[in-house]
Amino acid sequence: MTVRFDPSAPYEVEEADVVYAKPAGRELLARVYRPKGMPATPLPGLVDAHGGAWNRLDRTIGVHHGRGLAAAGVVVASLDFRQGPDHKHPAASADVAAGVRWMRAHAGRLGVDPERIGLVGQSSGGHLALLVGVRPKVAAHAGVPIVLPDGSVDAGAGDDSVLFILVQYPVPDPLARYRYVVTRAQAPPPPPAFDASRLVASHHGYFSDEAAMADASVTRIVGSGEARVLPPIWLAHPELDDNVPAEITEAFVAAYGEAGGQIERVHFPGARHGFMQQGGADTEKCVALMRNFVGSR
């Protein structure tokens, strides 16, 4: 059976875990979702960065969009990466950049078009996808050894650039979000609807200090002209997101547009932060729209 990218396709999907990188000798896994069959033409590829406030969760939580996109003929690699508190910024984004280099190095084996590789991420993973996407080939993301098709490892710079970025409820400005959750954690009863104290601890776990949060702010990078490229972005914005308030997203969208970038934001009425981790109508809508966006690239 041959397969090709088709936004309406119902291909069967196969999944496998592979080692994609070995920073400091530690094996990092990627769960690869692929349509079953032989590609008639090279397929789009997506490197997926999971959420979890830079400290929790792993590659397995991307199952809904991993399978949903692969069923349309997209190859998706959902990554594990180094997280806090054992590792600090920019370890996670360096691993995500290595994931892009890994997919490009394995494009022939995976049936991927090396010129049609994008990034996808949710929440803190959306932050990592944006950070890597707008600053390819920076020194901070270099040096993570990837596993090559012959099993050897390569710590060379490589090409970690991407054609487009798909993000769901991202945290584009860690410092602004940190200050927001600190305020929420100090709020008097009744308590916030989410555990703001846990999010404060997560910021402390991954970022050394507020200066590191500012350094990692994609809103600041774009607004200050430090972005090296501005790939087209598709952004899912849930209406009831009390984890990343609308003002933080609005500031990023405005900065990206003012810098000359193309960004398409889709609102999800009644949806909450993290909705992609649950199946349902919003998840299906999001996957369908992401399929269409990939097809337009």
Image (cartoon, rainbow, N blue to C red):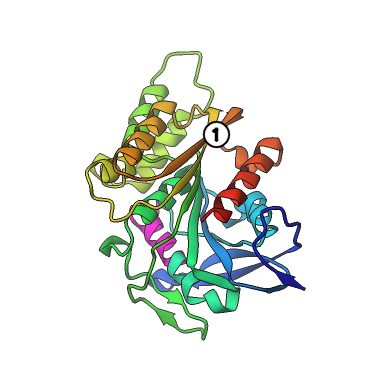
Residue at the image position 73 percent from the left and 57 percent from the top: 9
Asked whether residue 87 is drawn in magenta, I would say yes
Q: Which residues are magenta?
A: 85-99
Horizontal side, residue 10 vs residue 128: left or right = right
Asked whether residue 177 is drawn in magenta, I would say no
Res 203 → quadrant: top left
129 relative to 146, above or below: above
Instruction: Work out which residue is located at the far top of the displayed protein and give it.
Output: 189
Residue 277, percent across and down? 63, 43
Residue 6, can we see it? yes
The answer to which of 145 and 203 lies nearer the viewer is 145
| Three-letter amino acid code of the residue under disc 1 | His
The answer to which of 78 and 286 lies nearer the viewer is 286
15 relative to 85, above or below: below
* SS majority, magenta: helix
99 relative to 244, above or below: below
Residue 79, can we see it? no
Residue at the image position 59 percent from the left and 71 percent from the top: 42
Q: Which residue is mark 1?
A: 273
Residue at the image position 59 percent from the left and 74 percent from the top: 110
Residue 44, percent across and down? 56, 63
Q: Quadrant of the N terminus?
A: bottom right
Find numbered disc 1 in the image and state the secondary structure of the residue it sits on. Answer: loop
Residue 202, percent across and down? 42, 41
Disc count in the image? 1
